Image (cartoon, helix red, strand yellow):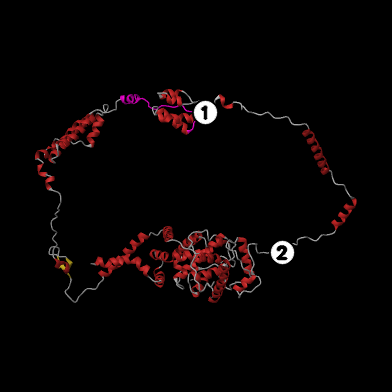
Amino acid sequence: MSHESTKPSIMSNAQRLSNCTEDELTAELLRDGMSSALFVELVSRYQKLVYYHCRNLLVSHDDADDAVQNAFIKIWQNAQQFKGESQLKTWVYRIATNESINLIRKRKPSIDFDEAQPEMAEMISEDLYLSGDDIALKLQKALCFLPFKQKLVFTLRYFEGLSYADIALLTSTSEGALKASYHHALKKLEIYLNVLR
Amino acid sequence: MDLENEKIGPAFSAPDSYFKDTESRLLQRLGIQKELLENQAAETVETPITIAAAVTPLDTLGVQKRARKQDPITAKSQGINKEVEAVGSVVIPPLTFTTNENPEWVNFGAISEEVSGNGDQIKVVSYGDLLSNTESNDAEAPSLNQENITPEIAEETVLEAVNLDQPITTVETPATELTQIETPASELELPAEIPAEVSTIEPSVIVHEVPESVGLDELESYISANVQPTSTSLEPLVSNEVEETTFVNPAKQVESPSPRIAEEKPISLEAPATAFAPIAGRQHESATPGWLGVAAALAAIVAAYFIWTAIQPPKVDTEQVALQQEEATVPEAPLDEQTPTDTIPDGLQLVEPLIMEEIPKYKEPNVYTITDAEEMPARTKRALQDLEDNGLATFDMEDELFEELDFESL
């Protein structure tokens, strides 16, 4: 009888984390630290988000893959430094963004993030795991003609759906500047798409 | 295109298998085993539940469930659980087993006591005995073992077979097999006559000497004619083909009754002597008339004159030279003025009115439309980027966004 009562609780340990909300995961991370089970849950929950975020920034699949691996390793190693001043997802995004920037700097040390990297547009159509949507590919090519700052803001806002407050927290930027940057990026992309059409 | 109202999806779509692979790689890199993690999680959850069951408060309102019982011999008191005591002693029933097998198939009662009492007659050979035998007499050991063991094994097999009510033929089979063991190993060797039998086999392969230049068709027809000499239907075919290839006619060989005779005659590749016979109706050349030679000589002289005049340098006219020198000193205006090079490559067509209609907000004069930008080279893209950077707007952000992000600060 007691065995029957313990059985569902045995099975629910992994499910409990998967059923937890983000706030509950944040609370557990702050209370108990990063356990292996929690890390596995974070990987399964945020892996796709991190990959597509890095892929939008880096375009190359291989670079995005490296950035994802490095980002989660840093999450595992620096979990105790998470102070809970932001959401867990924002923290993960920030580490992934940081890893993407580090990877770009490693590939091209003299890069200026105020300038665009149009050479990235050339490798889009030849890379792996494309959705096949033409207009999406054109938009991705047009993103390569944006300065990296605007590209990041547009990606976080348009594709990831983050709020201006989260993006401001992630980038340590004021919301007003982010809105202006997003607006400029949007208009510029519309011009590019009209040109590329 | 209005991006704010028209949502465009992401351009990348990775399969789930990639994410599973990435997850496994990552966990392997960090030394985390997912399966063990699930098991450990189950154990850690199970422990507090058992503790919670033990910590449940005692029900002191009802009948006292726990009491102590004193042992009359040792005078020590031990805690007892009345609920367990109330259940009483547990009686374990005797073990029984059932089987579907018919007990008549295994008739243990048929084994007589005489057979079961023959254990003294069996000589048990241990490893130590074997070792001592090998040390004392290596040559006698195998023969002794065979003599001692093999008859007893034979008897046992016979008795067991009788007990199992098996036919006699099956009983005799192992006995004969065991008697074969007693035969010396030298007799089991293969007789040396086998190679002699193999050597007596006559070779049936007939080697046909055929030149390499003979075609496959000729070869097939040749072989078929030799293999089946009696078939008369192949004869005209063989003769025709051989005549076409100017070989020695093997039709005679085919016509011959035995194929061996045809093999002895090699096929000659030389052409017959009549292949280069002179053509009978050859015509002789007629003699040319003499006036043709005279006309040719005149034509040669005229041609040489024209060539000579063409080779001679032109006569220098001093006046014309002076005029030409004067003209050369006057600077000439270039015939074609060089057009200023545009920074935009030829692939870009600048259509200003079109862009003005589409984007009224941006009315700078240096905004252009690119109509064929599908296959835009990198140079064009850079030019477009310069155009955009210089012509449309500047997008400077006031914040230092891309300083080294410190993720620990969050």
Q: Position of residue B35 (x, y in %)?
A: 35, 59
Q: Quadrant of residue B123?
A: top left
Q: Is residue A144 left or right of residue B287?
A: left
Q: Chain of mark 2?
A: B
Magenta residues span B192-215
In this rendered view, identify the residue nearer to me: B331 or B318: B318
- Marks 2 and 1 close (CB-CB < 8 Å): no
Total marks in image: 2
Q: Is residue B158 visible?
A: yes
Viewer-side residue, B22 vs B56: B22
B288 relative to B212 in the view: left or right = right
Whether residue B155 is situated above or below residue A9 in the rendered picture? above
Mark 1: which amino acid?
A: Thr
Residue B369 in the image: state x and y as whole percent: 61, 68
Q: Quadrant of residue B177?
A: top left
> Which of the labelled discs sits on residue B217, or is there none?
none
Secondary structure, magenta segment, majority class: loop
Residue linked to disc 1 = B246
Can residue B205 be found in the magenta stretch?
yes
Q: Is B74 above or below relative to A180?
A: above
Residue identified by numbered label 2: B340
Dot 2, crowdedness within 10 Å: few (<14), some or many (≥20)? few
Instruction: Answer whether residue B122 is visible to the viewer in this image.
Output: no
Question: Going by the image, does B234 lie left or right of A191?
Answer: left
